[in-house]
Image (cartoon, helix red, strand yellow):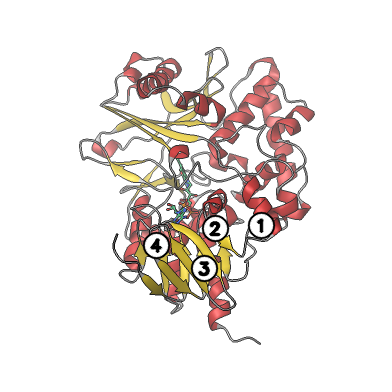
Amino acid sequence: MPSALEFSTEVIIVGAGLSGLQAAHSLTDAGITSVVLEARARVGGKTLSIRNGDGVGIADLGAEWLNDTTQPRVYKLAEKLGLEFNEVKVQGESVLQGFENELFRHEYGQQAPLPNGEGDLVNLMKELFEAEYIGMDLEKFDECQHDDVTLDEFVRSRGGGSGTLATVAVWTRVMLGCEPSELSASYFFVYCKSQGGLMKMRSSKLQGRYVTVKTGTQSIAEGLLRLLPSGSVKLSTAVKSIVQRDDSVEVLSMDGHVFRGKKVILAISTPLYLKINFEPPLPAGKAFLVSSTRLGYYTKTLATYSKPWWRDNGLSGASQSFLGPAAATRDTSDDAVSKYRITSFIAGSPGEQWSQLDANQRKAAALGQLADMFGSDEANHPTEYIEHQWSAEEWSMGCPCPYTPPGVLRKAGNHLTEPYRHIHFVGTETAPDWKGYMEGALASGSRGAEEIVKLLREPVA
Ligand SMILES: Cc1cc2nc3c(=O)[nH]c(=O)nc-3n(C[C@H](O)[C@H](O)[C@H](O)COP(=O)(O)OP(=O)(O)OC[C@H]3O[C@@H](n4cnc5c(N)ncnc54)[C@H](O)[C@@H]3O)c2cc1C
């Protein structure tokens, strides 16, 4: 083994996802030195962009969409880095696949016509949710209502039937990789409010998913890396312990290196704190939050075709399914390079069941669902098929954002961002706005850096 490195700096940042890299960038701008320790052999965390198999064009296996209007931080940063964008255009109808594989075609962005008047009930539920989250203060979790019930219990108590519950399950699966019976109603409302409303998950000018980055979203992280002083990001350096002393911290990596500094920024997902030994231990409220916070099951599959056959049938490639394995799909084609693609979001408990199949069975189930929903055997013959199971990734353990079951947010949510001695906590889930998105990750990184600049540079009054 190479001899152990001993490294001294002002701030040690754990995690080279967008939040950690943004924190390092903001500290550098303020004249504060830092080192970023990253467990993986790459930067970007939950952004991961690979070349298509034939070398032409990019596939985003993690984050894909951003918005030039509602997500100014990430858009402006990508622009500053010289990245180019593709606009998302949803043309054609959407499909809803019911419990018995019955298909409902409808206008994209409109509620699907569910039987027994449940389409109206779903619209009513959207209004009820909005009435709950509109007045929420996203920095005062101890005031949150409905943290004692699951979202499933909330919907049932407001008269939701099977179609309404199944629609709500599509939302929780796509947004958080979990079931409505697993997360507190309150957490879901916080999440909706944080992105400016439940329907912001759609693709249009003022909603979440409007543009993609031509070279993939990981190039935002790679661009940030290039702005940092050379050698200040250490890849393949997983942190195993953080020891706090009166006026310093010592961070130990799994391969035996020691990093000394004045402050630490933890830029990893809350459930991953459990992999780190804290000395002294995290305070009781924070430890409760960490051990109670969960990550959902999430996989993206990408099926690429030589032509966009679904468009010939007036379909947009957008779908929702009560049956699974995918909860939803989108057309993620790059027409400029003739890559016609449907991305499936296989999440929540149907995703977990699908993950138990062997690789051939998983592929057959994912493609078979596309053939059923879009009415063509062409779905079964992609030129390339990729699947990426985020829950199986040691340094993500799930995605896109952690959630809490009932009884956690109100009791311990305020500990999310509260520094513990020399340790400051960032990461997308700590952001009040766009929690779970790249925008939230960048905002949290800047906030963590600001906390430290105040402590290290600004004179005490
Ligand atoms: C499938 C998928 C689809 C998504 N779609 C979108 C989208 O369309 N638009 C959007 O805006 N967002 C999307 N997101 C969410 C977005 O990717 C994340 O919100 C954002 O990238 C999170 O950044 P982060 O820095 O908070 O965390 P992460 O990206 O998780 O970064 C944390 C880093 O810490 C490292 N790490 C963990 N533990 C340790 C340790 N002990 N020692 C050292 N390093 C450690 C990890 O390897 C990782 O690199 C998606 C995510 C996924 C996975």
Amino acid of disc 2: Asn
* Amino acid at circle 3: Val
Q: Secondary structure at mark 1?
A: helix
Residue 157 lies, with reference to residue 444, above or below; the image says above
Give the alpha-carbon distance from disc 1 to disc 3, as whole Å.
16 Å
Please give the residue where the numbered disc 2 appears in the rendered image.
Answer: 277
Amino acid, disc 1: Lys
Is 68 left, or right, of 236 in this rendering?
Answer: right
| x then y, percent, for residue 114 | 63, 19
| Element marked by disc 3 | strand
Q: Indicate left or right for 443 with 147 as reference.
A: left
Instruction: Name the residue: 71% across, 26% down.
Output: 121
Q: Which mark is residue 256?
A: 4
Give the mark nearest the N terminus, 1 or 4.
4
Residue 264's disc number:
3
Q: Are marks 1 and 4 in contact (CB under 8 Å)?
A: no
Mark identifier at residue 316: none
- For marks 2 and 3, give the one nearer the viewer: 2
Q: Marks 4 and 2, how far apart in space?
A: 14 Å
Earlier in the chain: of badge 3 and badge 4, it is: 4
